[in-house]
Image (cartoon, rainbow, N blue to C red):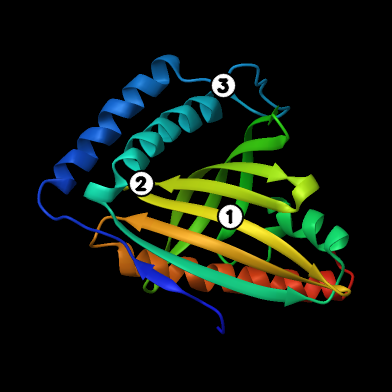
């Protein structure tokens, strides 16, 4: 796609596998004991099992994210798409993850963990239920995520984590010009070296498919 950039981040081989496994075990134990968000109340439909899973997985994300430069390979990709609709229509439709159900090729459902405000940002913590392709079969996946919505400035960010150590940082910007809006997904993928090519390929292809479906349905009035 025109305008797309890709940058390969640093990678150091050696003890990354054992460190990564240790991080998962240690952080999961810490999280189940005491992780939480001050002032954030569970939304309707949230359950103690979902809360515990999110907290444990998010603790693993925080540990791995802080050590990503030494134990994970990282690549960044920009994916722009221009939608023939004004930004005040595009932003609320595109930023609503639930609108990706039936449009994103992997996404099968979303479980709420918490919703709250942090300064000017509306924050949503969730678990995405996915069917991830692996050759001729699909593997059920549960991806923990946290979205920060900055509606007044027309941008949002989303951080997600999957085992084993697959992290995606996403910042999505909305630029109005005339009656159209250019949406750019700035994606950064981090994963173990053995998984980075697979992660980037699947991540980019699924985001492009979702972009095209969102463009189609915003422009035709479905959204």
Cα distance between the residues tagged 1 and 3: 22 Å
Q: What mark, if any, has residue 37 been given in the picture?
A: 3
Would residue 212 be found to the left or right of residue 171 on screen?
right
Cα distance between the residues tagged 1 and 2: 22 Å
* Percent x, y of residue 17: 17, 47
Of the residues under marks 1 and 2, which one precedes in the sequence? Answer: 2
* Percent x, y of residue 214: 73, 69
The residue under the point 17% across, 47% down is 16
Q: What mark, if any, has residue 163 been given in the picture?
A: 2
| Image quadrant in which the C terminus is located | bottom right
Residue of label 1:
171
Cα distance between the residues tagged 3 and 2: 22 Å
Viewer-proximal residue among 117 and 140: 117
Q: What mark, if any, has residue 44 been given in the picture?
A: none
**Residue density around tag 1, few if under 14, some if 14–19, many if 20 or more, within 10 Å:** some
* Percent x, y of residue 199: 38, 64
Decide: marks 3, 2 in contact (CB < 8 A)?
Answer: no
User: Tag 3, which secondary structure?
Assistant: loop
**Residue density around tag 2, few if under 14, some if 14–19, many if 20 or more, within 10 Å:** some
| Image quadrant in which the N terminus is located | bottom right
């Amino acid at each position: 796609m025109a305008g797309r950039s890709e940058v390969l981040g640093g990678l150091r081989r050696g003890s990354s596998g054992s460190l990564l496994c240790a991080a998962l075990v240690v952080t999961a134990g810490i999280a189940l004991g005491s992780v939480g968000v001050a002032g954030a109340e569970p939304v309707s439909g949230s359950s103690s099992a979902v809360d515990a899973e999110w907290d444990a997985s998010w603790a693993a994300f925080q540990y791995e994210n802080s050590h990503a430069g030494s134990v994970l390979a990282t690549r960044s990709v920009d994916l722009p798409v221009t939608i023939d609709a004004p930004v005040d229509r595009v932003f609320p439709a595109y930023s609503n993850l639930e609108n990706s159900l039936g449009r994103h090729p992997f996404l099968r459902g979303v479980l709420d963990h918490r919703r709250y405000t942090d300064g000017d940002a509306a924050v949503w913590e969730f678990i995405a239920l996915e069917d991830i392709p692996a050759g001729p079969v699909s593997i059920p996946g549960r991806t923990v995520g946290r979205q920060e919505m900055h509606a007044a400035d027309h941008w949002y960010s989303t951080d997600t984590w999957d085992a084993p150590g697959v992290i995606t940082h996403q910042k999505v910007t909305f630029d109005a010009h005339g009656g159209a809006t250019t949406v750019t997904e700035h994606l950064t993928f981090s994963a173990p070296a053995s998984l980075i090519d697979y992660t980037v390929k699947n991540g980019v292809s699924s985001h492009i498919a979702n972009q095209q479906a969102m463009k189609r349905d915003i422009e035709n009035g479905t959204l």
